[in-house]
Image (tube, grey):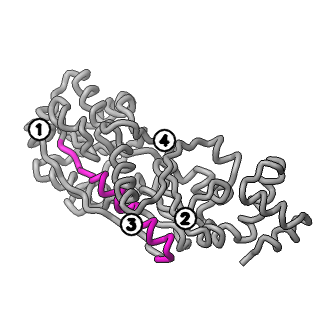
Amino acid sequence: MATIKDIADKLGIAVSTVSKGLNGASDISHEMRQLVLDTAVEMGYASKRLKAKGTKKVCILIENMDYENIDQFGYEIIMGFKLSAARRHWDVSVIPSNLNMQTQEKFDTYMLKNEFSGAFLLGFTLHDDWIKQLHKTSVPTVLLDNYIAGNNHVGYVGTDSHEGISLAVNHLVGLGHKKIAFLNGSKNSMVSDERYQAFVSCMHENGLTADENLIEYGYYVPDCAKTHVPTFLHNGATAIICASDVMASGVISEVTKHGLKVPDDISVIGYDDLPIASQLNPPLTTIRQDRIDLGKSAFLLLDGLINDVTISKLLLRAKFIERQSTKAVKKA
């Protein structure tokens, strides 16, 4: 394990300069501090320093996800994490992330520089620079709905996607639907891939074929329905499963614009059970993810990783919530 002297020897500078760089002293240049931090990470100093410090200062890094009020997906996840952290007197910082932030600094360097012992990442995609860097990180890190294989410092928390999609498909098949469309989440996401595989598999298990003309990817916003619902209707869909309640709200609006009724003509199922689900017209049948429990599970997983417990995954059970947006298929 690298020491401060090892870093100093590698850079050809004084030990005191390395110490100042690691501790954020104001009397060295920004460039020198960045060089010290990057070199410390490369030499494996980060993990040693964070453990030796014994602090429980952690961060929730969030990207591409709304979280500022209870109607938004990330809100209760963060609250669940912070509730558990408060009982253990952890210091939690919620930090919005973006691509510029990731290109300016490596993940491990950012964590070392800000003295974080671990991180919980929300809303990141497999394309993100920091996600790619997690294959080699030594910083305890928890991901929501993404998985990094082969690194004992990184774990994954989520809701069982196969169970959730199966509950939705089985419900619709039980109502006589055969032409079932699936409006999935964004591409380049592990959870979207899992849900796609679950949809295809469950359709097959019910003796049905998953028609690729009835499967599309979209962003988690209502407007994505405008692009895909006309295609679904043209190809004869009698039901639409959506990757989020927000997407489902857009689907209901778009179906109505085409002169059809939910659920009389088209059944719609959402995912998440956000507060908006019960307020839609008609109230939305959906798959519930317990977001408070997701946050609590993320805390438990991060606590384990910080204490060298190499947990790979924590999956919560999905729950089917039946409301008024689904109905037996309309007779021809």
Q: Quadrant of residue 180?
A: top left
Nearest to the observer: residue 122 or residue 284 = 122
Q: Is residue 196 visible?
A: no
Query: Residue 256's spot in the image, x, y percent?
Result: 22, 24
Mark 1 or 4, nearer chain start: 4
Q: Which residue is mark 1?
A: 324
**In the figure, 136 relative to 277: above or below?**
below
At label 1, which amino acid type do we have?
Answer: Gln
At label 3, which amino acid type do we have?
Answer: Leu
Magenta run includes residue 296: yes
**Numbered tag placed on residue 5 in the rendering:** none
Query: Residue 212's spot in the image, x, y percent?
Result: 36, 47
Tell me the crowding category of disc 4: few under 14, some 14 to 19, or many 20 or more residues within 10 angstroms, Cα based: some
Query: Residue 203's spot in the image, x, y percent?
Result: 25, 56
Kindly identify the residue that appears in the image at 21 percent across and 45 percent down.
Answer: 286
**For the stretch drawn in magenta, what is the main secondary structure?**
helix
Cα–Cα span, label 2 and label 4: 29 Å
Mark 2 or 4, nearer chain start: 2
**Numbered tag placed on residue 300 in the rendering:** 3
| In this rendering, the label closer to the viewer, 2 or 4 | 2
Quick one: SS at disc 1?
A: loop
Contact check, label 1 and label 4, Cβ < 8 Å: no
Mark 1 or 3, nearer chain start: 3
Cα–Cα span, label 1 and label 3: 36 Å
Range of magenta residues: 285-309
At label 2, which amino acid type do we have?
Answer: Thr
**Numbered tag placed on residue 55 in the rendering:** 2
Query: Residue 254's spot in the image, x, y percent?
Result: 28, 26
